[in-house]
Image (cartoon, rainbow, N blue to C red):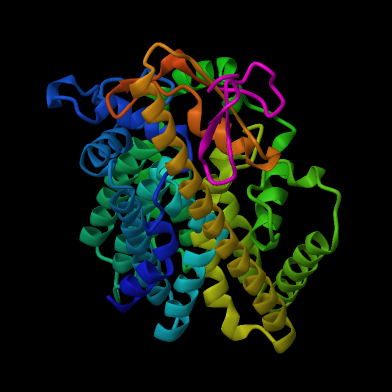
Amino acid sequence: MLLFVAALLLQLPLIFNPGYFSHDELQWASWSVDRAWSDVPWARLSDWESFQYRPLTFNIWMQLSRWFFDTPYLMHAACALIGAFNAVLLQLWMRQLGATPSAAFIACLIWVLNPYAMLTHGWVGTLADGLWVAFALTGIVAVQRFAGLAQSSTGSNWQAAAIGFVLTAVSLLCKEAALALPAAFLISWYCLGRKSTHLMAGLASSLAVLIYLCLRLQPMLAGTEITAAYSLSTPAPLQRWFEYLLFPALLTRAEPRALLLDAFGMRHWLSIVSIVAMLSILLVRNWRMGLLWILAPLAALVPVLLLPASFSHYAYGASAVAALLLCLAAPSMPWLGRSAMILWLTLTVLHGLQIAGNLHRSGRIQSVLLDNIAALRSNQPTTALRIRSQQQNQQSIIMRSLSGIPSYRGVVWGDFVVPVGHSDASATHQMKGDGQLESLLDGE
């Protein structure tokens, strides 16, 4: 309970965000808010031929939008509650594997503050990641409980198998990233005593994944051919992995995407040196734990390593595994290794706080912008609005917030509200630094 409350307190900047981050939240609200239950396009379990098959996530998202969309604080609080719940599950997992209560408590608070978690807990559009990791951690903790019994019985093995199968299936209904879940069970089996409970859970989880792929592989591959954001890139895995590895301690960067194309400066080398030093010392001191620290988060990233770009929420599950292993490894590390770890974690926490600040600032600006647009649409329903930003560094807020919104609070937007480039001469309005709109048309 103490960790749950502390995790929520650390997320207060995310909870008290008066707006949203992107167009995703607005689109889902347009499909679900102010509609009769029967008119909401609920996702069906039988729609497995669709490209993005996440029926549990989509239905939870639409219901949350029906309840809370008009009060962003409550919507963000719901996501923060999922994050705090995941922190508690992670703490239980750490304790099961031998971490002391104080070490597990501190490690989970640091995990909540890492940039991958801050982005995921603060952006409603990443609800799928919070949910699949919640179900995955629930399964892992339950299976580890059976593995921790003095003598594994046939009954406990079959219970572990049932848990592995069911919770993998439920996680896959949230997001396809749960394809990595069997690897978590099997790595646990290999590195944590080769207990039969982990093996049974891993095999059952693999069976759930196999059934899922039999139903879903063709639709997913077809979608990668027509959707650029999900196209497969065979040279990408190593690049993506380096980006995910270096990003947490890389201050001021918003996303790991295209990180390796940066002009490397002091902050880049600081991130590289701290993590290389920490990992090298860990491998020398405890090669199995060092290898596990590389392989286990990598296994959680496997489903996204072939994608053309790296995004923070894709590494949410991997960050939980990395936090677990650092917590277990810290007591056996010499002072030099701990110093490198403390440096890396300090940079990571500072980066996470920057991400939280960026989300809050973006939400505050978007909130004002949407209210201005809603007023203009109500007063001038036949007038098209082409909107650009006054400040070039805020153009991303315009493009991210206004793309493809069918309606907002019952007023049709569609082609009447169009975001345009910062220097687009056809713009009718521009957004000032605080989100307020001003007309660019003569006489207005």
Q: Quadrant of residue 234?
A: top right
Q: Closer to the camera, 164 or 264?
A: 264
- In front here: 59 or 92? 59
Residue 300 location, x and y as percent?
Answer: 53, 49
State whether residue 266 is above or below residue 177: below
Residue occupying image coordinates x 25% and y 53%: 158
**Image quadrant in which you'd find residue 137:** bottom left
Magenta: main secondary structure: loop
Question: In the image, what residue occupies the spot 35% across and 71% down?
Answer: 92
| In magenta segment, residue 350 | no
Residue 371 in percent (x, y) is at 39, 36
Relative to 146, is 348 on the left or the right? right
**Which residue is located at x 35 percent, y 22 percent?**
379
Percent across and percent down for residue 98 are 43, 79
Which span is picked out in magenta? 419-444
Q: Quadrant of the N terminus?
A: bottom left
Placement of 32 over or under 227, stated as above or below: below
Left or right of 133? Residue 31 is left
- Is residue 439 shown in magenta? yes
Farthest residue to the front: give it. 443
Q: Is residue 339 visible?
A: yes
Q: Residue at x 79, y 63 (%)?
A: 267
Q: Is residue 266 above or below residue 199?
A: below
